[in-house]
Amino acid sequence: MLSSLPFAWYYGESVRPITLSALITGFIGGVGWIAQRKKDRSSIGKREGYLIVALTWIVISLFGTLPFLFSGTISNFTDAFFETISGFTTTGATILTDIEVLPKNILYWRAMTHWIGGMGIIVLTVAILPFLGIGGLQLMIAEMPGITPDKLHPRITSTAKRLWGIYVGFTLVEILLLWVGEMDFFDSVCHSFATMATGGFSTKNTSIIGFSAYSQYVIIVFMFLAGTNFTLHYFLLHRQFKKVFSNEEYRLYFWIVAMVTVFITVGLLVYGMPDVEKAFRDTLFTVVSIVTTTGFVTANYYAWPSYLWMLIFALMFIGGSAGSTGSGVKMIRFLLLIRNSWQELKRSIHPQAIIPVKYNRKSVSQQMILNVMAFFLMYVLVFSAGTILLSLLGVGFETAIGASIATLGNIGPGIGHVGPVDNYAFFPDMAKWVLSFLMLLGRLELFTILIVISPAFWRR
């Protein structure tokens, strides 16, 4: 919060909202730390782990509302919480109708919520969730630099530092590259925070539409990097190129982006778009933005022919790579689901054959396949329940579908009245709480929250 102050001073804005917010947050955090500093933490187990992970995002979202409320930029608590949890979960859905009139220091804080959330989720998904045994991604442990189950705590700290270093480094490089273009320093910082976190909050009402082709291409590159497993960046920086380019999830990620981009570009040219380069750039930007769950916009894909925007809608159910700042179902799960389905077909033909599902040339346990299948089924059920709830609250069915997947997948823009040029201001308050819950569920891999709210979790 205090890092917002230089922007308030530079642009001649009031420092009171940010200062007061920081003091309240620091005071309560300090009291909590003093009260607990001598406690024995060696007994922290899985139950405490679930609760800590779930409460972290809720508590920081509550404190994160303070700058919005104290500055008067958002006067309604429901709206302020929606905007804040949208930031920390890197969703990018907004209730603000005129972003450019907001004070610069508040816009910076809004972007900072993305960056903090993105940084936190890297460590959460790569270093913590696999050891809690949820999400079906324990397979990643073998690929994590320095992590071994028998030396959990020091290895998590070491891994976290390495991944944070990569995250910060990419952010600084993007800031410099955007600053070299037509963006000023403030816009470069805010958009870099949003890009690396795959968030999507912009400082402009029209998102990235008004910026040059150069800036758009820079953002495309860094969105793609942010949607890639960060452990692969670690290997790349250590010149372990074979581990990167032989990774099956990465290859699937690359080819989905490439093939969908080519298909839609051709479709737009056939539809009548005269500029080949713009058709390619708008398509590539949209595909990377949606598949990485960033949610930046350079074109109104909802105005494209229906068979093209339906393809974009399908991408909303995939998401980025595991161990990235992207959300959604994740590439690795789709890969394992497809392979298991294909192997089941083979088993039907050869019932006596032992045909394992493999990932990166290693056999995947049946328990992990069951975890992935359970996650996907639960994802579809939660998406359906969210759609039904929003419909019951008076939201149009197409908009309810778009809003449900856009918030559960932490994407931001969807279809219907929450398309790429719309926002979430018109939703009733109760619907905003439903959407906020969907954002939290999607960001924390569903089971983290569902386990905590289940009655069995609270029984001795």
Image: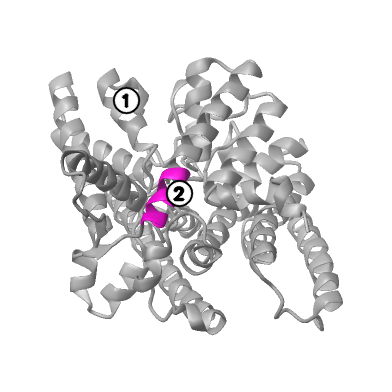
Query: Which region of the structure is painted magenta?
Result: 366-375
Q: Is residue 123 above or below residue 441?
A: below
The crowding category of the residue bearing disc 2, from other C-alpha atoms within 10 Å (few below 14, some 14 to 19, many at least 20), is many
Percent coordinates x, y for residue 267 in the rendering: 17, 26
Residue occupied by mark 1: 310
Q: Residue furthest front?
A: 352
Looking at the rendered structure, the kind of residue marked 1 is Met
Q: Quadrant of residue 94?
A: top right
The secondary structure that most of the magenta stretch takes on is helix
1 or 2: tag closer to the N-terminus: 1
Number of callouts in the render? 2
Which residue appears at 54% of the width and 25% of the height?
Answer: 387
Q: Is residue 405 visible?
A: yes
Residues marked 1 and 2 touching at CB (< 8 Å): no
Image coords of residue 284 (percent x, y): 25, 42
Identify the image quadrant of the C terminus.
bottom right
**Residue 327 numbered tag:** 2
Q: Is residue 248 left or right of residue 23?
A: left
